[in-house]
């Protein structure tokens, strides 16, 4: 029965993946380069004479002779332009032998301009993704294959459902909770199939996610945090989406960011109780709950620092800047970007703390065979 439900979960997830692949986002016609051709080129030579170097900052134009590797201009050479805007984050420099992504404007086959957008990374990313999938399948076999399916489903759900809903003005918190609930159910079904363990882990995870959502709304308003602290959010407003509620999107992002750790904790506790019941079929519900609570307390000891390490790792440059400038801790903690990270960390940790005992209680009630 367990194998049958796991197979049903895999089939349902694969069907969802196919549907999402075919589902249009509604923004396909909003391409910035509708009249341009995107292709891969190889840099043959470079001319840096038009670059102005002021130390850390470079600006100007890098002129590159490139050869087209694919597309309708394959085999042809042309002069490509790499514009430098004085931003270390955005600018790039090419050297002979580099492979670049280019946008080509042409008129009936006659080249008008070749703009070098960035280094070409798609091949390396594909190799990394395939290696990761093979690694999972080789060591975890069926479980690894289901993990790959859940990974693909999550990526497609975020890109094909969540992001378009945000852009269309749907309430971000409701949309985020709905997509998170869908992904939580699908991923846990791939782990357990459709049985009582799924009900236990899903209920515990959703309690933690809902608590995180409530805290994110309350704290964001209480701390007066604006969603514009998210990277590129202001650029989105200037691109014609000024009606978007960035603050609600920020609230939603907190729930999504914590959902992975919450799912992990609910699976750990449910699996532990399930293993206890499997080895002691005569265990009572009371003893099963006690075992679950013991596991929950041990897991909470480490899981509460999971989000702290994740978010502090992404903010390490900001923390280094504060220390290098001698900024007092009082000012650091009051800074709105740090306050936003505190909401992320503490709100998610509250969700984890609620998930552990609730999942242990449900697993202890649902999984044993004795009353």
Image: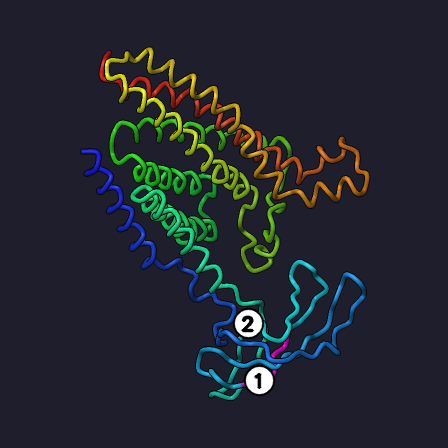
- Please give the range of residues in magenta: 77-81
In which quadrant is the N terminus drawn? top left
Q: CA distance from mark 1 to mark 2?
A: 14 Å
Please report whichever mark, 1 or 2, sits nearer to the chain's N-terminal start: 1
User: What crowding class fits label 2: few (fewer than 14 Cα within 10 Å), some (14-19), or many (20 or more)?
Assistant: many
Left of 16 or right of it: where is 83? right
- Total numbered labels placed on residues in the image: 2
Left of 186 or right of it: where is 315? right
In which quadrant is the C terminus drawn? top left
Which residue is located at x 42 percent, y 54 percent? Answer: 131
Q: Indicate whether 98 appears above or below 325.
A: below
| Near-viewer residue (342 or 75) | 75
Q: Quadrant of residue 98?
A: bottom right
Q: Which residue is mark 1?
A: 78
Q: How is the image coloured?
A: rainbow
Residue 208: x and y, percent? Answer: 45, 28
Q: Which residue is mark 2?
A: 99
Q: Indicate whether 269 appears above or below 33.
A: above
* Residue 79 magenta-highlighted: yes
Which residue is located at x 51 percent, y 41 percent? Answer: 253
Q: Indicate whether 77 appears above or below 38.
A: below
Which residue is located at x 48 percent, y 84 percent? Answer: 75
* Residue 84 magenta-highlighted: no
SS state under label 2 = strand
Q: Which mark is residue 302?
A: none
Which residue is located at x 29 percent, y 46 percent? Answer: 13
């Amino acid at each position: 029965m367990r194998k049958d439900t796991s197979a049903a979960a895999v089939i349902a997830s694969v069907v969802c993946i196919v549907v999402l692949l075919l589902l249009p986002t509604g923004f396909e016609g909003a391409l910035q380069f509708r009249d341009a051709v995107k292709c891969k080129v190889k840099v043959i030579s470079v001319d840096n004479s038009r670059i102005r170097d002021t130390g850390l900052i470079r600006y100007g134009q890098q002129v590159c002779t490139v050869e087209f590797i694919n597309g309708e201009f394959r085999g042809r050479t042309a002069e490509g332009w790499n514009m430098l805007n004085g931003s270390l984050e955005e600018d790039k420099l090419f050297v002979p032998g580099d492979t670049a992504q280019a946008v080509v404007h042409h008129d009936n086959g006659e080249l008008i301009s070749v703009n070098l957008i960035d280094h070409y990374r798609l091949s390396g990313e594909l190799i990394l993704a395939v290696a990761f999938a093979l690694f999972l399948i080789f060591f975890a076999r069926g479980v690894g294959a289901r993990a790959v399916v859940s990974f693909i489903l999550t990526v497609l759900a975020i890109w094909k459902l969540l992001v378009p809903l945000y852009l269309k003005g749907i309430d971000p918190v409701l949309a985020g909770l709905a997509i998170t609930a869908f992904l939580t159910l699908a991923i846990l079904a791939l782990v357990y199939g459709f049985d009582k363990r799924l009900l236990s882990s899903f209920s515990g995870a959703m309690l933690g996610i809902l608590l995180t959502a409530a805290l994110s709304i309350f704290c964001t308003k209480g701390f007066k945090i604006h969603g514009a602290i998210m990277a590129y959010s202001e650029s989105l407003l200037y691109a014609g989406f000024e009606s978007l509620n960035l603050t609600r999107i920020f609230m939603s992002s907190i729930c999504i960011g914590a959902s992975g750790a919450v799912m992990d904790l609910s699976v750990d506790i449910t699996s532990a109780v399930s293993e206890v019941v499997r080895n002691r079929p005569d265990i009572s519900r009371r003893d099963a709950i006690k075992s679950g609570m013991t596991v929950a307390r041990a897991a909470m000891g480490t899981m509460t620092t999971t989000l702290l390490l994740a978010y502090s790792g992404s903010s390490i440059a900001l923390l280094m800047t504060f220390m290098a400038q001698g900024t007092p801790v009082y000012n650091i903690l009051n800074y709105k970007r740090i306050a936003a990270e505190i909401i992320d960390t503490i709100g998610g940790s509250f969700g984890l703390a609620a998930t552990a005992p609730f999942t242990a209680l449900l697993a202890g009630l649902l999984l044993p065979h004795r009353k």
